[in-house]
Image: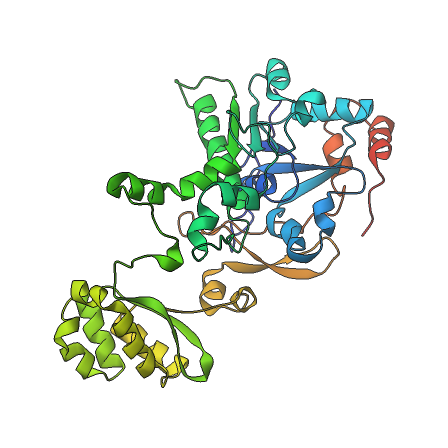
Amino acid sequence: MNLAEPNSLPLAGEGSGARLPLSGIRVIEFTHMVMGPTCGMILADLGAEVIKIEPPGGDKTRTLPGLGIGFFRSFNRNKKSVVLDIHTPEGHATALELIGQCDVMLENFRPGMMSALGLDHATLSALYPRLIYVSHKGFLAGPYEKRLALDEVVQMMGGLSYMTGPKGRPLRAGTSVNDIMGGMFGAIGVLAALRERDQPQSGTGRGQEVQSALFENCVFLSAQHMQQYSMTGEPPPPMPSRVSAWSVYDVFTLADEQQLFIGAVSDKQFLSLCKVIDAPHLADDPAFADNAKRVAVRPELLRRLGEILRHHRIDELSVKLEAAGIPYAPIVRPEQLIDDPHLRASGGVVPMQTDNGGTTDVVLLPLTLGGRRPGVRQPLARVGEHTVEVLSRLTGTGAAIEKRAASVESIPKK
């Protein structure tokens, strides 16, 4: 297999000479929506050259309305865009040749689609034995494997919705948690497969198929509750109905109807809280002498705390809780995070040029490498922006390349 030449790619805040861990790895991505694109974005952020294959007209995720409007910009940075119609003979042949130049292939289409196109793992591994093939699926092998799945579907099936909502009211998590984590596990699988293939002396020299699935991801999230049942024999109650291990671990309504979570999880923290809110009578009450006693009378304790906290302002109380070392958190809405001082100072939210020439703020991977944060290296790709560049690596030159590009779709101009 022809591999990409090593690139010299920058980390956030670094010069162009800094290298990222996956520099020199080439990835071809046949994905849409969230799960597969998340995997590709992680690999791209870590330095891989990720070539996103879009159909004529572009990935439909680019134009989703409502809650899906932010999907494309959130999960497709640092990628190149190539337009191919893989349902045509020429587009299919071009895709096969491109795959042969790549280390990794990603896909997240419905069960059976890639097999019908001859782009499944069995077919491609026979042609390109070093290829690492990543399928993002609804379910791993088993009775459910041919079902179609969505994040909300598996949240209902995997215990998460039951544990999130009040009793009798299953509630999905407020983000695409399984799609995003499924992409993360796909990326973890890629890293492991690259290591197994390329490790000095003991490397196999061969690729393999990696599968990541929504349902199994959600069950992994529910594993602690499954283990709780195994150990106690009692079904775990939904989180809103849970018996807390700590007496003060709740959301309180303060002055001006503002809300604040406070978690005093030790006897020392409880005493500190009583001091902060000027409530020595609670600290001296024998019924609240230790955590076990406080948990036994938790509703009454929370009622009394609530009455006191009603008279505290959130800005003033937050400063005092911070100084006292008591865990607390305001209830923050997503739009408020854009200007969060910690995220700004740590480089977690940075500007990115969009595909229409504007600028937007994007959230980077939640990790650092040697104190450096992988960042945005290029504008969000326009539909087909890199078609000619990428196809020029294939057999044929000049007019043949232009004919290939023209046959799939004209390239939009800036």
The vertical placement of 63 against 340, above or below, is: above
Is residue 339 visible to the viewer in this orientation of the structure? yes
Most distant residue in the top direction: 126
Residue 85 on image: x %, y %: 79, 31
Left or right: where does residue 71 sit relative to residue 10?
A: right
The residue at the point 38 percent across, 55 percent down is: 239
Q: Quadrant of residue 135?
A: top right
Residue 259 on image: x %, y %: 43, 74
Left or right: where does residue 372 sit relative to residue 282?
A: right
Is residue 25 visible to the viewer in this orientation of the structure? no
Q: Nearer the viewer, residue 103 or 221?
A: 221
Count of all numbered marks drawn on residues in the image:
0
Q: Quadrant of residue 103?
A: top right
The residue at the point 53 percent across, 56 percent down is: 174
The vertical placement of 126 against 259, above or below, is: above
Most distant residue in the front direction: 168
Left or right: where does residue 304 sit relative to residue 147?
A: left
Residue 52 on image: x %, y %: 67, 38
The residue at the point 86 percent across, 34 percent down is: 406
The vertical placement of 32 against 317, above or below, is: above
The vertical placement of 107 against 160, above or below, is: above
Q: Nearer the viewer, residue 191 or 414?
A: 191
| Colour basis | rainbow
Q: Quadrant of the N terminus?
A: top right
Q: Quadrant of residue 94?
A: top right
Residue 292 on image: x %, y %: 17, 62
Left or right: where does residue 93 sit relative to residue 325?
A: right
